[in-house]
Image: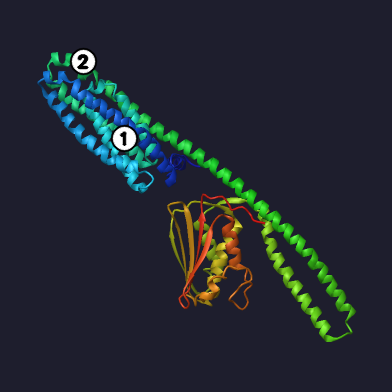
Amino acid sequence: MKPSRSQLLKRLPTLFEIPAPDPERARHRIEVMERNTMLPVKAVFILLILHSFHFHSPWMSTITSNLDVQVETVQLLFGFYILLTVVLALPILAVHRMPLAVLQWSVVTSSLIDGLMLAGMTSIAGALDSVLFWLFIGLILRNAVSVPPGFSQLVLNFAISLCYALVAVVEATVIPTLDDQTQRALDMTPPAELGQLFILRMLVLWLVAITSYGVQAFLEKQRLAIEEASEFAAREGQLRSAGRLAAEFAHQIKNPLAVIRNAAHSLERSIREGKKSAALQVEIIQEEVTHADRVITQIMGYAQLSEGRVEKLNVEEKLAEAVEQVVPAAVPTGIRVEKRFSGPFPPLLMQRGHLSEILVNLLQNACEALNGHGVITLTAGTHRDHTVEIAVADNGPGVAPEKLGRIFEAYFTTKEKGTGLGLAIVKHNTELYGGTVRVESVLGKGAKFIVTFPAKSLPKPFKT
């Protein structure tokens, strides 16, 4: 079924949505554009203007009109501009030590001040007819690099275009007050001839702002698609390697077990009429071999790593599925699950079964600790570095301090009928994707298991 026109229009804004760059990339952009490029350019610009004010402005004293007031005002504002530029340059010079929010605030403020100052300089250097117009385009392109993509960038660039519009307002109020001789001396174009030029240049500024944003959106989406494809390929390669190793391990172990089992059966037949103690020993051997075979079969589950595929998983959907699987809403129970999610969540690149095993094992572990009555608190959130953190807490009896250090060991269990593999599987599956798992518990006050997944991290190399 093809989407309707209204649905296509609703999806259109998503084509231009750009995820904010991670803190390190945003900091690098500010360093390259603001510290390494704009600050030297501003220093040269300030020196040139100071030189112009002191040595090349005799014409200013010959004009006795409102333009004199305008020029003097711009000179006064230029002094404030220098002061503000120095103040705003301090955090940019310390780009690696300042919080990113402070850096971004400095960049936005600096850009607005630059736009206003450029408007003032343009108003006394030919106004709307000045070649300084092209510097407004430079400011817009500079913002496209330094300011995080999104609504804030578009608003800032629109404000820069309004700074150019301010030049038109100033010119419309000044030119009519000048006589013809002064207008000819300053080579000013009559206002009637500037209307079309102003509209054209405003359209150019808006077109540059929208185009630069669109190009940035396209390039960013391309970069993310390439990174994602590389991450998919790397994860699937790692998982296939792990699966092949697990399958080989299981195959090598199961063969000797089969020989032992056959030998035990032969021994049983040969001593069937012998001592009972010998028969008992044979029975024990058979039970242990059966148990070992069951454990190996569970370990063979890792061989499925090579059979699955990495997918983009929705965190909230998988959490809801795990809760419904362990504590079904249709089944009466004394256990209540409280959900506390603070999304949005980035997609996790994992095999679907691995994430399900992690969540189900943690929830099942909490249910068993509550013994049918209590509260499970399921929380999930995203950190600034895109790390997804999921926590499963219960108000059960907790874990003794001496057992916390071994809680994730295979075959270690505090339950009478536990296999000791549930939390070991949680740890294995989490670390396979570069994540971590830890436990916090106070005896008598419950336990809390916290799992973190780096959404942009490749899997750890599989160790043999």
At x 70%, y 68%, the residue is: 295
> 36 and 410: which one is in front?
36
- Could you classify mark 2 by the number of other residues whose Cα lies within 10 Å: few (under 14), some (14-19), or many (20 or more)? few
Farthest residue to the bottom: give it.
Answer: 276
Q: Residue at x 38, y 38 (%)?
A: 146
Image location of residue 411, percent across then percent down: 64, 71
1 shown above or below 82: below
| Nearest to viewer (mark 2 / mark 1) | 2
Residue 76's spot in the image, x, y percent? 16, 32
* Image quadrant containing the N terminus: top right
Residue bearing the label numbered 1: 158
Image spot of residue 156 (x, y percent): 32, 38
| Left/right of residue 235 with respect to residue 107 in the rendered view | right
**Residue at numbered disc 2:** 187
The quarter of the rendered structure image containing the C terminus is bottom right
- Which circle marks residue 396 in the picture? none
